[in-house]
Amino acid sequence: MDLQFLKKIRVIISLIFFISVSVLYFDLSFSIQSWFADYPLFLQFIPSFLKLISVGFLAGLGFFIVLILTILFGRVYCSTICPLGIFQDIILFIRRKIKRINFDLKSPWNKTRYTILTITILLFLLGISLGLNLLDPYSNYGRIVNNIFRPTAIGVNNLSASILESLGIYFISPMEFVGVKLFSFIFSLSILILVAWMSVKNGRLFCNSICPVGTFLGLISKFSIFKIGIIESNCIKCGDCETVCKSSCINSADEQIDFSRCVGCFNCFDVCPSIGITYLPRYKKEKAVVPNNSKRDFFKNIGIFLIGSNLIAKAQQKIEVYKLNTVPVIRNTPVSPPGSLSIENFNDNCTACHLCVASCPTQVLQPSFLEYGLLQIMQPRMDYKSSYCTFECKICSEVCPSGAIVNQDLEAKKTIQLGKVNFIKENCVVYTQKTDCGACAEHCPTKAVKMELDIEVNKNAPVTNQEICVGCGACEFACPTKPYKAIYVDGNPVHQIAQKPQEEKLEEKVDLKEAFPF
Amino acid sequence: MNRREFFKKTSIAGLAAYSYVKFGNNNIFAQSENPYDLVAIKGGEPEAMFDKAMQSLGGMKNFVKKNQTVVIKPNIGWNSTPERAANTNPKLVSQIIKHCYEAGAKKVYVFDHTCDSWQSCYDTSMIEKYANDAGATVVTGNSESYYHPVNVPKGKKLKDATVHELILESDVFINVPVLKNHGGAGLTISMKNLMGIVWDRRFWHRNDLHQCIADFATYRKPDLNIVDAYNVMKRNGPRGVSEEDVVTMKSQIISTDIVAADAAAAKLFGKEPAELDYIKYASELGIGKMDLSKLNINRIIL
């Protein structure tokens, strides 16, 4: 049967997936992520696998769908669903527009690919998901977009906004961007360069040497019910299929195909003049660390160059009468996002795809460096230096594809206690300056931080109540003291339920006819 | 002054001079006398109260001239519904915009430098919707690129700040705070609302909040202060915890004198103006009058 049309279908489906995944990272208005993320993401192999384990069968259904697809038709996942695979196809498409390239049969990198797969699986069985984090193709694509392309898009957005603004048009709003994190940026850039270089030189070599998902699905596809094979009687031995094979897995001379490396792109169907290559049923004869803040901030500032001139730090001389405070903030536990249940659950299931980072309207979610530990590098954490968690928001739990952040009812989310508030009196403006402030209490959504009269200074000073604190970090973010905050949130290793603030009825009658008190 | 502002100001000045020559004493820009220093009104819906109060001040045409640009600065600080009264009443904002256009305003802008993420604040407060429907342009206040440095020469502790360009470039500045309880400042009214037109608020908090609030009020006095006291948050301010914090007072205070407006609003809330340091400091700086007995007040009860 002539299956030429399959290539067109593949291209259409792959573009739908690719655009759907990408748009989640690029939507700067944060309006689509919460309802749309599930559709393109539930089929992503590693996230659904983790969700299957942590949340349950239905949540991880996508994992089985990919397995069934692979058992039926081989690694079609790699060419239609995997955004990193499609990204490589796009690079190749552009590369071909510049200059025609021909591929030819190459021997498989079996040692490399099986070693990487074995190590990844062994690590995972030992409870270490680092291999998955660093190598999952979806997460790598996510990181590339979040750490490189998205900042670029924000730069373009802000540049356009500033051009329009100079004409008095406020149609586009610039976005205040807190910057990229150094390690995540360098890692993503390295993967981007590696993937781009490998694909330009050798087609889908990355997918057939480094990617553990590709190797794993390749093993399964050895047992696929339908495999691509060459029909001897039809083949005219033109060799065209071999020259278009991105996986370099077609041996046209011997009419052999290494199906474990085939990514199901169907380019060979498209190019074959004689229906000599097609899907054949299997039963037929086969032919077929401790972070250093000042250094990190310095590098973070490098990212600012990416996002337009308007963010260049404005060096403005201020006459600060304010005295620097002295007690450093020592956080025992980092703060993981709401819905992550515990640091352990989060660390076990997060692949560091950074979609929650890209979807967070306040940018409080930032890639970590060593806050969780070396094995959890790049997994997002709540960075209360950058921002704080909006009381009424739970987008991160709605977009997370791997079950690291579990979707919660909004009312339930409002009582999740990520951490507890801690007050350092010695650092507080009210005590060091003897002037009013109240920035922390102002921002607190539950009044776990309240201003109450302290006769010691005859001023209203912060009073904290850990029981009703949700650990959103608003107080810490708002606190104006330097160089250390006077109030901060220490993470809960296991998230708790905060008590609801008790509200007394306000006893106050208003007589609308009463004369004004002045 | 940037180029755009320069052209705008010079062309307006030219037009004014021309019209003076042409129309002599009957010139169309002549300001009619304000009969009252302050109008306090209660007992109606926000729109009706505003209509009535403005009528007694001679109408919006006393404050907005033909073809002028107007910037309205409500309090949109929090991701909070109108019922919780953490933000200015959206109906009032809408009515002010309509009055501005009726007076011949060329363009009306609305913005605030919000505390929560600005998209959520603009949306949940309903102010974006009401302002857009009334024909205003809603602009973000949360982009540092829109803020430009200014000096505050009369300030004691606050000597400079960066201010949103709409404040710098618009002809008319209308300040529309909501009256509510405030953990740090005691009450937030007109002067405190001006914290939403500057970028770096942490500096204020570090360097004597009350003095900074008073200092900044010397920079540019709003042309009109309209205090929304329809729903008033009596405790847990400025964000509030629930609707339990709110009482309905159905009141409004309007004045060109920012200190008088805050003093009257404080009284309405049940506090003596002198209890609030920033009102006292502002009065000492000569920004306005906190002694309400010296003002000509129009009190209207609907």
Image (tube, rainbow, N blue to C red):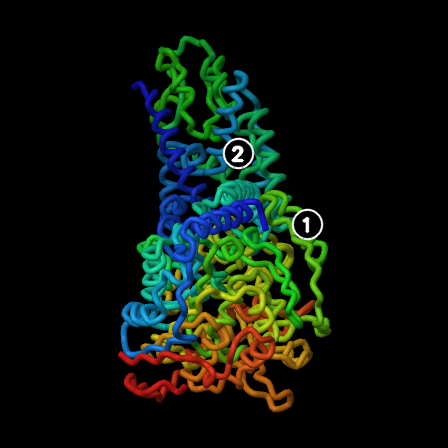
Indicate whether A257 appears above or below A16: above
Q: Secondary structure at mark 1?
A: helix
Q: Hey, what amino acid is under mark 2?
A: Cys
Give the answer, above or below, for where A277 lies relative to B247.
above
A65 or B150, nearer to the observer: B150
Disc assigned to residue A207: 2
Where is residue B26? Give x, y as percent: 39, 57
Q: Which mark is residue B67?
A: none
Task: Note whether residue A47 is visible.
Answer: no
Name the front one of labels 2 and 1: 1
Within 10 Å of disc 1 (Cα), the crowding (few <14, some 14-19, many 20+) is some
What's the residue type where badge 1 is placed?
Phe
Residue A82 location in percent, x, y?
A: 45, 38
Circle 2 marks a residue in which chain? A
Task: For the N terminus of chain A, give its image quadrant.
Answer: top left
Report in which chain the residue with disc 1 lies: A
**What residue is drawn where x is 45% and y is 70%?**
B256
Neighbour class for label 2 at 10 Å: few (<14), some, many (≥20)?
A: many
* Mark found first going from the N terminus, 2 or 1: 2
